Image (cartoon, rainbow, N blue to C red):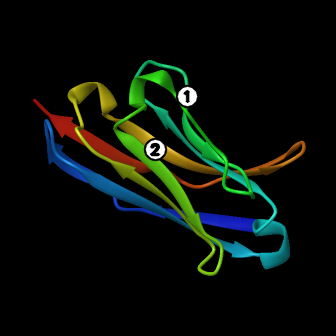
Amino acid sequence: QVQLVESGGGLVQHGGSLRLSCAASGSIFIINHMGMGWYRQAPGKQRELVAEITSGGRTNYADSVKGRFTISRDNAKNTVYLQMNSLNPEDTAVYYCNARMGPVNYWGQGTQVTVSS
């Protein structure tokens, strides 16, 4: 079993930055071999992938955040980060951390990010 706890959300002005963190606990061996990702869900919209990183460090980003967001992971701390720069109101959403291995998925409880115009 893996538990994920997000932190770092909040209210920020247009053009500002935030860094989200996702701390994983449970089976460390499994965590270090899992792909990790950040998803977001805005009101009235479906949950969408923001960024993901494989156990080997390969990354993938949604087109809407390329060049602005950076995902990284620290396996020694069992933590994945999402650095978000140049935020705009369209980035407002609840951000969820995800860990997956094959068909198994784990989700955090989410952290709210609100970008004011």
Q: Quick one: quadrant of the C terminus?
A: top left
On the image, which quarter does residue 46 sit in? top right
Residue drawn at 74 percent across, 57 percent down: 56
Residue drawn at 40 percent across, 31 percent down: 65
On the image, which quarter does residue 51 sit in? top right
Residue drawn at 53 percent across, 58 percent down: 72
Q: Is residue 41 left or right of residue 84?
A: right
What is the secondary structure assignment of the residue under circle 1?
Answer: loop
Whether tag 2 and tag 1 are in contact, CB under 8 A, the answer is no
Kind of residue at disc 1: Arg
Q: Is residue 81 left or right of residue 16?
A: right
Mark 2 or mark 1: name the one nearer the start of the chain.
1
Q: CA distance from mark 2 to mark 1?
A: 9 Å
**Residue nearer the viewer, 45 or 99:** 99
Do we see residue 8 in this rendering? yes
Question: Where residue 97 sits: x, y (%)?
Answer: 57, 51
Question: Where residue 7 sits: x, y (%)?
Answer: 41, 63
Residue 47 is tagged as 1
Q: Is residue 113 above or below residue 75?
A: above
Q: Is residue 12 above or below residue 47?
A: below
Identify residue for label 2.
95
Kind of residue at disc 2: Tyr
Q: Quick one: quadrant of the N terminus?
A: bottom right
Residue 16 is tagged as none
The count of marks equals: 2
Q: Is residue 111 above or below residue 4?
A: above
Is the residue marked by circle 1 packed among few (<14), some (14-19), or many (20+) residues within 10 Å?
Answer: some
